[in-house]
Amino acid sequence: MINISLPDGSIKQYTQPVSGMDIANDISPRLAKEVLSVTVNDEVWDLSRPIASDAKINLHKWDDKEGKHAFWHSSAHIMAEAIEALYPGTKFGIGPTIENGFYYDIDLPEGQVVAEKDLQVIENKMLELARQKNDIVREDISKDEALKMFRTKDDQYKLELINDLEDGTITLYRQGNFTDLCRGPHLPNTEAVKAIKLLSVAGAYWRGNEKNKMLTRIYGISFPKAKLLEEFLVLLEEAKKRDHRKIGKEMDLFTFSQEVGMGLPLWMPKGAQLREQLEIFLKKVQKKFGYEQVITPHIGNVNLYKTSGHYEKYGKDSFQVITTPQEGEEYLLKPMNCPHHCEIYKARPRSYKDLPIRFAEFGTVYRYEMSGELHGLTRVRGFTQDDAHIFCTPDQLKEEFKKVIDIIFIIFKALDFKDYTAQISLRDPNNKTKYIGSDENWEKAEQAIIEAASEKGLNTVTELGEAAFYGPKLDFMIRDAVGRNWQLGTIQVDYNLPERFQLEYTGADNQKHRPVMIHRAPFGSMERFVAVLIEHTAGKFPLWLTPDQVVVLPISEKYNDYARKVSNILNISDIRTAVDDRNEKIGRKIRDNELKRIPYLLIVGEQEQEAESVAVRQQGQGDKGTMTIDEFARFIKSEVEQQLAAIDN
RNA sequence: GCUGAUGUAGCUCAGGGGUAGAGCACUUCCUUGGUAAGGAAGAGGUCAUGGGUUCAAUUCCCAUUAUCAGCUCCA
C-alpha cells in the first residue's frame, strides 16, 4: 500500500505506483487539466513519473513557480526541437528557465545566424510542434550510453555536461523527434503550450566564460493561454515606457553627446536641479549623522593608486595615465575617492577622541567601463558618488555600520523604495588570490557586516565571490522597469586601505593604533540613482524633489503679467515655479504641462487677477478650486514639509 | 571587449539605385481663449562616417563609429 499525503493533510492510498497525473485525476478532472508538475517529498517531478513509495506531494498549476518552471522548461525543449528542424546540425548548450520564460544557447552550423527577424519562423514551428501533442518521456540512462549517444550527434557541449555528471543520475527527455539531456521536470505532453513569444536573440559565452566560444542565445516565453501572452506583452510595453533613457529625454533631464564621449552624461538644467535636490537632502541627513564635507581634486598621482592597490588591480583597464610636461609625473583621473580621503585623514595626527571621523564628498570619478557595458545613466564612465569614508576604532565598527544602514533606510523611505534586495558580498573562499589583505582581517570584516545586518533586521542574501578586492560589502539592489537588478547603496568594511596608507590614531594607552574604514554610498551614484528613481516614479517625482513644482498658466496674454507676479511670489518662497506664457489656449497649456508631469498647475484669468488668487489644478486629479496666492504658498509648503518630516521620524 | 540588430529633420518614424517624406516640436502671422491638442504659412536633413560597385548610391557591398539586446566585467 502506498500512502500519498496531500497538502491539506488528507491521505490517498494506492496499491501500485501512481503518477502525479493519476492523483490529480482522482481529485478532479479539472485539476488534471490544469496541473503542470508535482513536488514529491521536496523534489519537483514530472506528472507522469510513477511514485512507488509513501510520499508527501503537492500538485502545481500555472500559478505556482514550480508549475511555470516545468512549463517553460518544456517550452525550451520545444524551441530546441524547432531549431533542430529548421537549422539541422545545430548543437545545443543549455536551455534553462528564467524568472520570466526560458532561453536556449545554441551553436549554429558554420555560416548560419539567427536574427531577430527569424524568430517568428521559429515561433511558428514551435506552435506546430506543440500542436502535435507529443508525450514528453523521461528516460534513465547510464553515463556511457549518454556519452555514446551525444558522440554520434557530435555535440561537444552536451558531452562536456555529461562528463561532469555522476553515473546513475543522468536522464533524457524525449518528445517527437527530439531528445535532450535534461534533469527535468517536464510537462507530460507538449499540447499545454498554447502561446509562444520569442523575445530576443543575443550572444552568450559557453558556460559564461569569455574565453569560450560565443553561442547564440534565444530568449522566449510561453503561456497556456493566448490571453496571458497578450497581458504579458502589454506589461512589457508599459515597462518600456518607464525607461529612464526615454523619460530623461522627454523631460530634458540629461543627454549624451558623441562629441563629448560615450558614457559621459550631460545634465541639463532640469536634471541638474533634480540632482541638487537629492544632494541637499542627503547632506542634511548626513549632517545629522555627524558627517563633514570634504572636497578633493579629479586627478591624483599614480603613486596614490599604487599605494591603495587600485593601480595594480584596475590600472590597465582605466583611462590611461596623464603624463605632465615635467618628466616623471604621472596622474590618473580618479576612479574612486578613498585614497584622497585617506590622505586627508593622514594630514594630521588623530586621537581616539576624534573618532569616528566621517568624510563625505559628492566625488566625481571616472572608470573606463567596457563599451558594451554602457547603459543610459545606470552604467557610465564618469559619475558622481555620494561617497563617504568613516574612520573608526575596531570597537566602533559595528555601531557605525548600523548607522549607515539607517541612512539608507531613510533614503529608501523618502523615495518609497520598498522592493529592494540586501546582498552581503563575501570573498570567494576558493580564490583568495583575487583579494588583498590578511585572512584575519577579512574574517573580522565579514563578521562585522553579517552581525550588523542581522541586528538591523535586514533580510539578506549572501553571495560568495562578490566582495570588493579590499573588503566585503553590503549592497542594496533595486530593479529597473524591465526587471534588471542594479546596485544602488553600498557599505564596505575595509581593514586593508588603513594598512596600506599607514593610517593611525593615538589610543587612550598613548599607543599608535590602526583605524578601520567604512566606505559607503547610500545612493551609490547620482547617475544610477536618478535612473532608478525615474523608472520607479515614471518621472512623477515627489513634490519636494521634482524640478518644476508649479507652472502658472495665464488664460490669455492679457494675464501674463499677473502670472509672472504669482510666479515671482512663489519663487521667493522657494517654490520652484515657471510661467507658460505661450500663445496657446488654456486647454492646450493644461495638456502639455500635465504631460510634462508638473505636480501643480495654476490657472489665472480675469477672476483670479481681480481676487489676487489662483485656480489650482493637481496633477492627475483635475481642478482643486481657487485659493489666494498666500493660501496656495502655505498649502504647497506644508505638503513639502510633510513629505520631508516623514523622513525625519 | 564579444555576438547580433539598428542608425533618415530637435523627437517618433515611413520610404527607397535616378539628389527625400509624415506627425509632433520649432519660427512667423491670425486668434485672446476658463480646465487634456484653435487656424494658416514657414524654416529645418552631406539620409552616422569613410571607402568600394555603378552612367548614377541615402538605398547594394566592405570597414569604422555610436546606439540597442544579451554575454562577460563592475574599485
Image: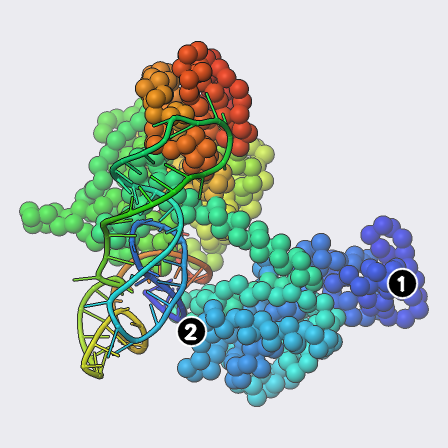
- Amino acid type, callout 2: Lys
Q: Nearer the viewer, residue A235 or A594?
A: A594
- Give the side of residue B70 with respect to residue B11, left or right: right
The residue located at (68%, 67%) in the rendering is A193
Question: In the image, which disc is placed on residue A98?
Answer: none
The residue sitting at 52% across, 49% down in the picture is A239
Tell me the element at label 2.
loop
Classify mark 2: residues with Cα within 10 Å, few (<14), some (14-19) or many (20+).
some
- Badge 1: chain ID: A
Rendering coords of residue A378 (x, y %): 40, 47
Q: Is there CB contact under 8 Å for labels 1 and 2? A: no
The residue lying furthest to the bottom in this view is A152
Judged from this view, the residue extending furthest toward the left is A326
Nearest the viewer among A46 and A187 is A187
Judging from the image, mark 2 belongs to the subunit labelled A
Q: Is residue A494 among the parts visible in the rendering?
A: no
Q: Is residue A233 visible?
A: yes
The residue indicated by pointer 1 is A26
Marks 1 and 2, the one that precedes in the sequence = 1
How many numbered callouts?
2
Residue for badge 2: A213
**Residue A149: x and y, percent?**
61, 85
Decide if residue A453 is on the left or right side of residue A195: left
Say which amino acid is labelled 1.
Answer: Asp
Alpha-carbon span between mark 1 and mark 2: 50 Å
